[in-house]
Image (cartoon, rainbow, N blue to C red):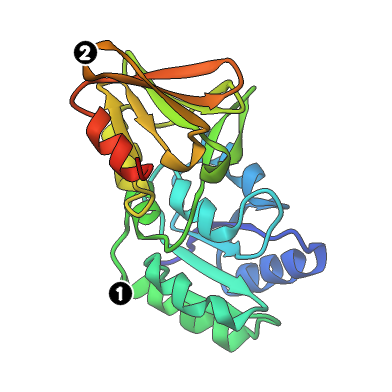
């Protein structure tokens, strides 16, 4: 792989400039230099074909790990950071390599060689998202871009015509998921409960429960917002809530 086409994101201007210079000196074509993860995600929507992404891990708005989980197409990732404790998580997300700052030219060359050799298979954004350990943030639509919403601030998810909405503080936010099964797969340890075919509840968000006729129930997740629980799901909801 010669004349690799790459893009990079780093919120530190000097580090970003140094990495870009080193990549160019190594024969790479740097197509974009972005100041944060959200800007990179937005740029990737219309980006040309890339051979690799170089991502700082600690960035405001969206970390490099979160960006790697949300890239719209499979692209090999190399992480750069000053924090060595991120190394294990970097390789858990199938990064091609992990480079500590300040970056040395010979160390960067070894990472580029790994890319040329194709030693790590490309993974899709969904695969990376499922591999991220402990990640509880996910992107939702915000105008022409995205913002990241924390699962802990979400009361439930609802699906309509293959569009999943996350509800937080009574407000609906459109996600990139198309089914509740994808939400469950993204947060396997969250103990989310399917209370209706179109509703997925986060039990910790429940403020109260009211029995209804026919063995059903309703749960309150926000002031003035109650969700009806199906008869088949009511026993499980009560069990999880300790009732």
- The residue at the point 46 percent across, 46 percent down is 71
Q: Residues within 10 Å of mark 1 (few under 14, many from 20)?
A: few
* Local crowd size for mark 2, using a 10 Å CA cut-off: few (<14), some (14–19), many (≥20): few
| Secondary structure type for disc 2 | helix
Say if residue 182 shows up in the picture: no
Q: CA distance from mark 2 to mark 1?
A: 58 Å
Q: Closest to the observer: 211 or 24?
A: 211
The residue labelled by disc 2 is 214
The N terminus lies in quadrant: bottom left
**Whether residue 169 is situated above or below residue 119 in the rendered picture:** above
Q: Find residue 28 and report its image quarter.
A: bottom right
Task: Determine whether the residue tagged by mark 1 lies in a helix, strand or loop.
Answer: loop
Q: Position of residue 62 (x, y in %)?
A: 62, 51
Residue 2 in the image: x percent, y percent?
43, 66
Residue at 32 percent across and 13 percent down: it is 161
Q: Which x, y percent locates residue 120?
A: 31, 70
- Drawn side of residue 221 relative to residue 118, left or right: right
Q: With 214 as the anchor, is 40 left or right in this view? A: right
Q: From this view, report whether residue 106 is shown above or below residue 40.
A: below
Residue 37 left/right relative to 66: right
Which mark, residue 119? 1
Which numbered mark, 2 or 1, is in the foreground of this view? 2
Seen in the picture, residue 33 relative to 1 is either above or below; the reply is above
- What number is the disc on residue 72? none
Farthest right residue? 14
Quarter of the image for residue 243 reads: top left
Q: Nearer the viewer, residue 38 or 187?
A: 187
Residue 195 in view here: yes
């Amino acid at each position: 792989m010669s004349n690799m086409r790459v893009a990079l994101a780093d919120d530190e201007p000097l580090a970003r400039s140094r990495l870009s210079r080193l990549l160019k000196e190594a024969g790479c074509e740097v197509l974009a230099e972005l100041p944060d993860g959200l800007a990179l995600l937005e740029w990737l929507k219309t980006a040309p074909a890339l051979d690799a992404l170089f991502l700082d891990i600690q960035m405001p708005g969206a970390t490099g790990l979160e960006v790697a989980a949300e890239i719209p197409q499979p692209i090999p990732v190399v992480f750069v950071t000053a924090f060595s404790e991120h190394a294990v998580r970097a390789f858990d997300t199938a990064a091609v390599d992990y480079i500590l700052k300040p970056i040395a030219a010979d160390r960067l060359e070894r990472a580029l060689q790994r890319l040329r050799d194709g030693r790590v298979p490309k993974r899709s954004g969904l695969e990376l998202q499922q591999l991220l350990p402990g990640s509880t943030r996910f992107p939702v639509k915000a105008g022409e871009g995205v913002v990241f919403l924390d699962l802990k601030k979400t009361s439930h998810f609802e699906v309509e015509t293959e569009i999943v909405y996350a509800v937080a503080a009574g407000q609906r936010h459109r996600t990139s998921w198309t089914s509740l099964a994808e939400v469950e797969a993204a947060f396997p340890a969250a103990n989310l409960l399917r209370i209706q075919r179109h509703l997925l509840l986060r039990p910790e968000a429940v403020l109260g429960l009211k029995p209804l006729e026919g063995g059903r129930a309703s749960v309150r997740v926000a002031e003035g917002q109650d969700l009806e629980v199906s008869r088949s799901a009511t026993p499980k909801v009560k069990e999880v809530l300790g009732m």
